[in-house]
Amino acid sequence: MAENMNSELNMIGSLLPLFPCITFDVEYAGTLHRSSAATRIAPSKQYALVKKNVDAVPIVMLGITLSNEYGNLPLTADGEGRLFQLAWEVTFSDFDPRRDRHAPESVTFLRSQGVCLDKARARGVYSMVYTGSIFER
């Protein structure tokens, strides 16, 4: 959550020279806009549709995974010396289902996966603060 944001961003920055491939997984509260076309749509129209959905609802979570050219992830050890692969999950405080547009089935799914939206609003990172912190580095 927000209390360890700077230390985690510093760690990510220090690992980038060795693990320069970055994968992002972004969670939003659903798809509000869909294509009415019965067949596949052109890539430019598909992009416009995705952008319209992304612009319509606040981000809920961001997953970040680093890897090297061989697909290896950075490792860390726990207190007992066991190795674990590193990945990061950022929970944002922006989204409030009582206020923001969303797909109800997506909020139900997020909750079923253990996402506590009340806790996210109270302890999560505000997306603009996170964005600013990334670009300060």
Image (cartoon, rainbow, N blue to C red):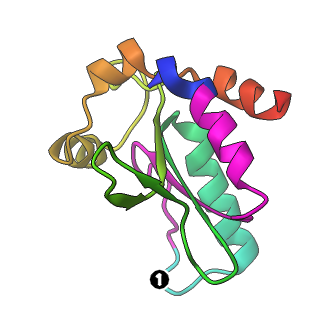
**Where does the C terminus fall, quadrant-wise?**
top right
| Quadrant of the image occupied by residue 100 | top left
Residue extending farthest left: 112
Quick check: is 5 in the magenta stretch? no
For residue 117, above or below residue 22: above
The residues colored magenta run: 7-36
Q: Position of residue 84 (x, y in %)?
A: 38, 59
Q: Nearer the viewer, residue 67 or 28?
A: 67
> What amino acid is at disc 1?
Ala
Reading the image, the residue beneath label 1 is 38
Q: Relative to the observer, which residue lies in front, 106 or 42?
A: 106
| Residue 67 appears in the picture as rendered | yes
Observer-nearest of 89 and 35? 89
Q: Residue at x 56, y 85 (%)?
A: 40
Residue 18 belongs to the span the image colors magenta:
yes
Name, please, the residue furthest toward the top: 122
Q: Residue 32, relative to residue 96: is it above or below? A: below
Q: Is residue 18 left or right of residue 86?
A: right
- Mark 1 Cα within 10 Å, few/some/many (few <14, many 20+)? few
Residue reaching furthest right? 136
Q: Residue 117 location in percent, x, y?
A: 30, 26
Q: Residue at x 56, y 39 (%)?
A: 56
User: Which residue corresponds to the image point at 56% horizontal and 49% vertical from the top-left?
Assistant: 53
Quarter of image, res 71: bottom right
Q: Is residue 32 left or right of residue 6?
A: left
Q: Report the side of 40 relative to 29 (left or right).
A: right
- SS of the residue under disc 1: loop
Q: Nearer the viewer, residue 75 or 94?
A: 75
Q: Is residue 95 left or right of residue 79?
A: right
Q: Residue at x 48, y 54 (%)?
A: 87
